[in-house]
Image: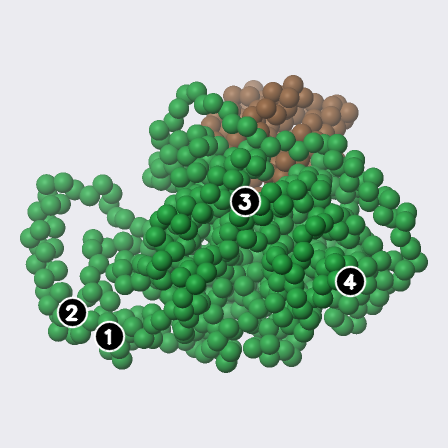
Amino acid sequence: MSQRKLRILIAKPGLDGHDRGAKVIARALRDAGFEVIYTGLHQTPEMIVAAAIQEDVDGIGLSIMSGAHMTLAPAVVELLEKQGADDIVVFLGGIIPNDDIPVLKEKKIREVFLPGTSTEDIIAWVRDNIRPRARAA
Amino acid sequence: MSKPSTQIAPTREEGTPEHPTYDAGTIRQIREAQDAWEKEVLAASLERMPLRREKFVTDSGIPIPDVLTPADRAHEDFLRDIGFPGQYPYTRGPQATMYRARTWTMRQFAGFGTPRDTNQRFKYLLSQGMTGLSVAFDMPALMGYDADHPMSRGEVGKEGVAVSSLADFEILFDGIPLDKVTTSMTINASAIYALACYVVTAEKQGIPPEKLGGTIQADILKEYIAQKEWIVPPRPAVRILIDMIEWCSRNMPKWHPVSISGYHIREAGATAVQELAFTLADGFGYVEECLKRGMKVDEFAPRFSFFWDVHNDFFEEVAKFRAARRIWARTMKEKYGAKDPRSMMLRTHAQTAGVSLTAQQPYNNIVRVALQAFAAVCGGTQSLHTNSLDETYALPTEEAVTIALRTQQIIAHESGADRVVDPLAGSYYVEYLTDELEKRAREYLDRIEEMGGIIKAVEEGYPQKEIAESAFRHQKEVESKDRIIVGVNAYRMDEETPIEVLKIDDALAEEQIARLREVREKRDNARVQKALEAIERACEDGSNLMPPVLEAVRAYATIGEVCDVFRKVFGTYREEGRF
C-alpha cells in the first residue's frame, strides 16, 4: 500500500496578523514534501474546521501570537470533534506562556511549539506524529 | 537599466567632490600604503590564520571589506553628504544640539486588559520617570470590532487595551491632563476613530485640539505590507488617512497624524535595506496622495514622523537612521520641492526588535535590548521604546517593563551617549554603511516607482513577497548555524527556569462587554444613527471624514459601528493565503 503525502493545513485563527511564522512553517513543510494549504489571515475556528474537512487534511497547524490561544485553539478541537473529524491532529505555535502548555495539551492540542523552534524539529514531529487519515471510499 | 526616476544627486558615482573630506594627495598615498599592506601584512596573516568565514556581510548582506580607510571616502563631499546636525541633509540629526539640549523621550508602549488596568499602568510609568504615553490597543479595536463581536472571541484586552467607545477612552485617560503629556497611539486601520476619541476626551477635559501633542500611527500601507491589520482595501484606507492628515494640518498643529513605520516591516522579516526602502516608499506615497488632494507640501510634511525597528547589527542600525534622514531630506527637497526645513527633517521613534528576543534563556534579552537601544541612541532617535525580557511569552510584567525603562535611563545617564551629537560620524565603516544603505534603498525606491508607486506595488504583493523571502532566508541561516542566536542554536541549556509572566484574566472581556452594552442603552440612539449616516455620506461624496466621525464619537457610536460603515461602503479587504 503506497502511502500518500500528508496534507497539512496551516491556519491563522483570530484577528492576529503576524504571519511571518505561519508562512515560514508552511514553506518549510512544503519543501519537506508535505502538501500544505495555508488559510490566510483572520480565520474563525469554524472557517478553519470547514477548510480542514473540505481539503481533507491530516493535521492542522495553528499559529497564534495574540494571546487568544486558550480560547481559539480548543475551539478548533471541539469543532473537529463535533464534525467527527477528531482524528485530525492539531498542533500550535506562537507566543504561548509555559503554564498554558499542559492545559492546552489536556484539551487535545497535541504539541505546542515556542519561538526559536527549528523548522526541522517541526517537520520531524509532523512525520512522527501525523498519519494519513483513512479516506471514505 | 531604466534611468533612475528619483532626480537626486547620487552619493557615490560622481567624480571629484566639491568639499572632499580628504585631499587627493593623501588619498593616493593611502591607496599605495594599502596595496603594500595587503601584499605584505594581510597576506601573511591570512596564510598563518585564514578568515573565519569566506566573506563578511552585514545583516542586510552589505559586503564588509578587509579594512576601510579615507581612500574609501574619496567620493565623500562633507558639506553635501554629512554636514551639520540640524541642517540639510540632516544626516547627523534633526536638531543642532540633539541630546545635549534634551534627551530622547522614553516612551514605553503599554496597554492590556481593561481601560482601568492600562490607566493604572500609565500612572505607574509616569511616576517612574517615563516622559510620554504610548497606547497599545487590543486586536478587536485594531480591526474595528466591538468587544462583543464574534470575531473578538478570546482577543479582548489580550494584546492591548480593550476599547469600544468614548466611554473607554474617558477611563483610559482619567486623571491624566492631556495638555501636559504627549501620547502615542498605535492604531492604524481604525485610527480615525481613536483620534476622534482622543480629541473628544480632551474636549471633555476642557482642552482644545490645538493643544494636543502626540502621534497616531495610522500608517495603513505597512499594514498590507507587514502587520496585516486592515479593514478596507488599500485605496479607500489611504483616503481615510489623507482625511486625517488634512484635518490635523488645520486643527492639530502639535500632532503627528502619521507615524510611517518600518518597525512591523522589519519584524515581518525585512532586512534593514528593505525596512528603509519600503518605509520611505510608504512615506513618499503619502506625500503624493496629499499633493493630489491639493495640499501644499509644507502644509503637511512637517508633521510626518517615522518609526524604526532597531535590530542586532549595531553599526548597520546606526547607519540606517543616518541614511533614512538623508534620503528623506534629499527627496523632499529635490523631488517634492519642500521649502520648510521641517518638511525635510526626519524625526523618529524607535523600538528595539521584538523579533530578536528569544524564549530560551530570557534574561539574555536584557542584553540584546540594551545593545539595540544604544544603537538607536547613537543613531539619533527622538524617542525610544525598549522591549521587556518576557515578551516572547506574553505582555510584559511590571518588573520586566521597569528593567526595560531602566535600560534607557542607564544609557542616558551612564554611557556618555547623551553628551555627544552623532558620535559615529566619520567612522569609515559607519559612513560606508550609510552610503551603501542609501544606494540600496534607492534601488528599491526606483523599482517601486517603475511599478507605478507604492500603492500599486502593495496591491501586487511586491514588498510582501520580498519580505517573506528574507524571512525564510533568515530562518534557513539560523538552522544551518550560519547565523548564531545565543541560547537558540548555540549555548543551549537543558534545563531552564521558567519566568513569571503577566496573565490577562478572561473575566475582563465580560466586564468590557457589560460596559459596552450599558453605553448602547444609555446613549441617544437617534443621534448615533444620524451620525453614522453622515459618515456614510462623507465616504461616498469624498468630503473629509473627520468631522462626522467626531460627531459619531461624541454620540457614543462604537468603534464597530463606525468601521461597519467603512466596510459597507468600501468593502472588506482579503489577502490570498500565499506563502
Query: Residue B136 versus residue B560: which sits nearer the camera?
Result: B136
Q: Chain coloured green: which letter?
A: B
Residue type marked 4: Val
Query: Which one is in front in this view, the residue at disc 2 or the one at disc 4?
Result: 4
Q: Quadrant of residue B506?
A: top right
Q: Which residue is mark 3?
A: B128
Q: Earlier in the sequence, mark 2 or mark 4?
A: 2
Image location of residue B465, percent across then percent down = 51, 52
Q: Residues within 10 Å of mark 4 (few under 14, many from 20)?
A: many
Quadrant of the snapshot with the N terminus of chain B: bottom left
Q: CA distance from mark 2 to mark 3?
A: 52 Å
Point out which mark residue B27 bears: 2
Question: Could you give the CA–CA distance between mark 2 and mark 4, rounded to whole angstroms?
Answer: 62 Å
Q: Secondary structure at mark 1?
A: loop
Residue at the image position 72 percent from the left and 49 percent from the top: B174
Residue B549 is labelled as 4
Q: Residue at x 70, y 66 (%)?
A: B209
- Chain A shown in which color? brown
Q: Label 3 sits on what residue type?
A: Gln
Kind of residue indicated by mark 1: Pro
Does dot 4 land on a helix, a strand or a loop? Answer: helix
Q: Chain of mark 3?
A: B
Q: CA distance from mark 4 to mark 1?
A: 55 Å
Callout 2: chain: B
